[in-house]
Image (spheres, helix red, strand yellow):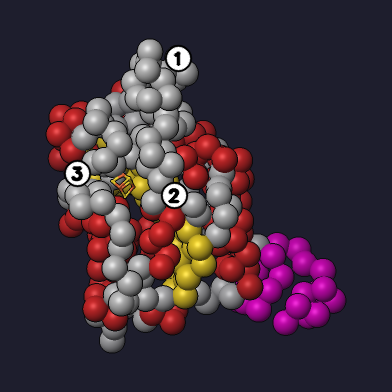
Amino acid sequence: MATVKDFRNEVRPNWCPGCGDFSVQAAIQRALANIGKEPEQVAVISGIGCSGRISGYIHSYGFHGIHGRALPIAQGVKLANRDLTVIASGGDGDGFGIGLNHFMHAVRRNMDITYIVMDNQIYGLTKGQTSPTSAHGFKNKTTPEGNIEHALTPSQVALGAGISFLAQGFSTDINQLTRLIEEAINHKGFSLVNVFSPCVTFNKINTYDWFKEHIVNLDNDESYDPSNRTAAMTKVIETNGLCTGLIYKEDRVAYEDLIPGYKPEALVNQDISLDRDLFEQCL
Ligand code: SF4
Ligand code: MG
């Protein structure tokens, strides 16, 4: 059985020392080993950004795609080989800026893939511009007088689009993050793990200390019910999206199990009327 070491390769990450993305990489590798995956059973598909390099740092199948397009590529990979564990990854600019439309449609489509976003509330690779998740009033070189736009809150967008699994983590809590990624991969449907992953070089506002001060950890709230969509939406509004843990989960049939393919047993169980001729042709 594969261990964490089997998911490591010879490539040394060129992230800045202290970047939150190191923890995300380690958590993914630990999670894959913990749930008994082998490297050849996994494909990591990434977009563009510092975080997009992650597909080259994990020993598995991988594809470093183009800006904002990790999710279309990942969905194509999953449809081509449904036996693969498919992980899409990228940053807040990649996924919630240029890739936002793909994100919302992937959410409602509910294909069985896991999307891991390293959200540092800035564009890091291009040296620190205001991103879609930068707060109103955020000051940096592109908004020296303060960001006049309001931030997009990924958790609210995900719930609004009808996500079936939503979790958030923080780079300093690698044990929680590993567990959330395991649960996300095991979830049968689209899962988002949005990770607060500080950019220590360009974001001097949303630092590790800032996140520690503002994050509400749902693991500490025994009364919280992640099966209640209304409670989940209330929580992400109350916390301005700054909550970690399992936020929402529901069982729903995955997209690829609703169309003819090479898994007939999935269709037989769903009481779906089929064009038998078409179905046979697809076997
Ligand atoms: Fe990480 Fe920021 Fe450095 Fe990019 S610029 S590697 S996001 S710390
Ligand atoms: Mg970013």
Label 1 environment density (alpha carbons within 10 Å; few <14, some 14–19, many ≥20): few
Q: Is residue 268 magenta?
A: yes
Find residue 3 and report its image quarter.
bottom left
Look at the image and tell me whether residue 267 can be seen: yes
Toward the viewer: 272 or 55? 55
Tell me what residue is drawn at x 37 percent, y 35 percent.
Answer: 128
Which quadrant of the figure contains the N terminus?
Answer: bottom left
Q: Are marks 2 and 3 in contact (CB under 8 Å)?
A: no
Could you tell me the amino acid type at mark 2? Gly
Number of callouts: 3
Tell us which disc is closer to us: 2 or 3.
2
At which x and y percent is residue 92? 43, 41
In this orientation, which residue lies closer to the viewer: 186 or 87?
A: 87
Q: Dot 3 lies on which element? A: helix
Q: Are marks 1 and 3 in contact (CB under 8 Å)?
A: no
Q: Are dots 2 and 1 in contact, CB under 8 Å? A: no
On residue 56, which mark appears?
none
Distance from Cα at disc 2 to Cα at disc 1 = 24 Å
- Disc with the residue nearer the chain's start (2 vs 1): 2
**Relative vertical location of residue 71 with respect to residue 161 in this rendering, above or below:** below
Q: CA distance from mark 2 to mark 3?
A: 30 Å
What segment is highlighted magenta in the picture?
A: 259-283
Q: Which residue is mark 2?
A: 49
Instruction: Pick whichever, 249 or 29, lies toward us.
Output: 29
**How far apart, in angstroms, are the residues tagged by discs 1 and 3?**
34 Å
Q: Which residue is depicted at the point 41% across and 68% down?
A: 56
Which of label 1 and label 3 is nearer to you? 1
| Sooner in the amino-acid sequence: mark 2 or mark 3 | 2
Amino acid type of the residue that numbered disc 3 sits on in the rendered structure: Asp
- Which residue does the numbered mark 1 point to in the structure image? 148
Residue 219's disc number: 3
Pick whichever, 29 or 253, lies toward us: 29
